[in-house]
Amino acid sequence: MDILNDDIKKLYFKFLIPTIFATLVTSIYILGDAIIIGRFINDKAMAALNVITPVFSLFYGTGYLLGVGGAVMMASAFGEKKIEKGQAFFTISVLFGIVFSVIYASVLLPFFKPIMYFIGASDEIYDYISQYGYIFVSGVPLFIFSAMLQVFVRNDMSPKRAMAGVIAGGITNVVLDYIFIVPFNMGIAGGAWATLAGSVLSLIIYSAHFFSKNNRLKLIFGRINLNNILLVFKCGFPNFFIEISNAAVISLFNIQLRNTIGFTGITAYGIVENAYLVVNSLSNGVSQTAQPLIAANYAAEKTERVENFFKAGLITSVIISVLVTLFGELNPEFIINMFVNADNELMGIAVYAIRIYFISFLMAVSNIYISGCFQAVMKSGYSMKICILRGFALSAVFILIFPLIFGSCSIWFVMPCVEFLTLIYAVYCIKFKIKL
């Protein structure tokens, strides 16, 4: 593939299809656990999994910080025919992947219980949290490097291998979830072991790329310097912030629901949040499709191609947002029954939550996509502002004040309001600040 000269539509779809599959299957690592745990253990176990989700976001967010940050800079360098400079960005990401793995394990394992209570755990679900969480945290390097290498392998002209790695790992996770939890009766701990096994298989498949004749991902230590390190972190930080903000928002929702609606509210939010994981994965898929294409052509000063790639991704984002919103509005009971055997109380709360919360998806997909495109053209500052608005600033304020002013059920309106206000800012940036 020649990113700078090949037909735009053919090139876009060559990247889009495997990338969408890859990012979508990534969500299965949590989604598969949630469905099987909720259906075959109980709703308390699924609520426990939702409390642990922020840790999952931390690990994968770090992987995307290093993966997207390093791979976008690498794609830009390769577009300028500076191969060794691009390889230096890969080397930086690998080294910091090791560093973050050690730091997270050193903090989370000895202080696991107080951290879990701080982010929303309660006495009635902590036993489930500990059974899953200690195993999950022990696999931190698997999750960081799996997310990171997925992006690098795809940006090194191997989108099909990246797709194969994620799909194989995701399918393995789901199959082993069922085997470990149902026939082997390992409980929620079986879900954690299945997740680790899926990540191991994904890493093996990604690593096969290093033996390919077309591999350009090589460790070069001579060009590591503070400026290149900062470029990786600056470019990848919006992706990291998206994941970390999502983790913070989940914790705030859980804490507020625990204090207002109660345990049933946390369970309903667990269903909604798992649906959001799928939408977020689709959004990231479109964003990660456009990023290397836009970055390379932007570096080569091919403005028309940049505009066409941006429009293709935006159209895709709008189509996805409409389809997923309609599905949620028309089939809330189906979504609920995927996860739990709901009683009348839970069904009533969850149906209302889904129909309100899913409105936010009309805007969320485009917000994530536009933020990713700003990264690709080295406008990380605007990308960061979008991430701050939708990821934490507006969300945190609205989660705290909506129930106080409008009542407990108003908490489900938080994200539609957040995404709408963020989209207004994103459109303003495109029209008046950045030409794409």
Image: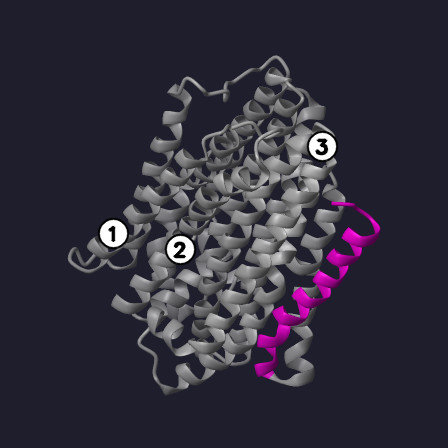
Image position, residue 265 (x, y; %): 48, 77
Residue tagged 1: 175
Which residue in the protein does label 2 denote?
30
CA gap, disc 3 and disc 2? 40 Å
What secondary structure is marked by label 3?
A: loop
Residue 48 is situated, as x and y percent measured from the top left of the image, at 40, 64
Closer to the eye: label 1 or 3: 3
Q: Is residue 367 above or below residue 336?
A: above
Q: Which residue is the extreme one toward the right? A: 432
Q: Amino acid at mark 1?
A: Val
Element class at badge 1: helix
Left or right, 127 with respect to 181, comes to: right
Magenta range is 408-436
Can you tell which mark lies on residue 302? 3
Asked whether the viewer can see residue 41, the reply is no
| Mark 2 element type | helix
Rendered view: 248 above or below 267: above
Residue 199 found in image quarter: top left
Q: Quick one: 281 or 292, which is closer to the camera?
A: 292
**What residue sits 71% from the left and 59% below the top?**
389
Quadrant that contains the C terminus: top right
Q: Mark 1 Cα within 10 Å, few/some/many (few <14, many 20+)?
A: few
Of badges 1 and 2, nearer the viewer stands 1
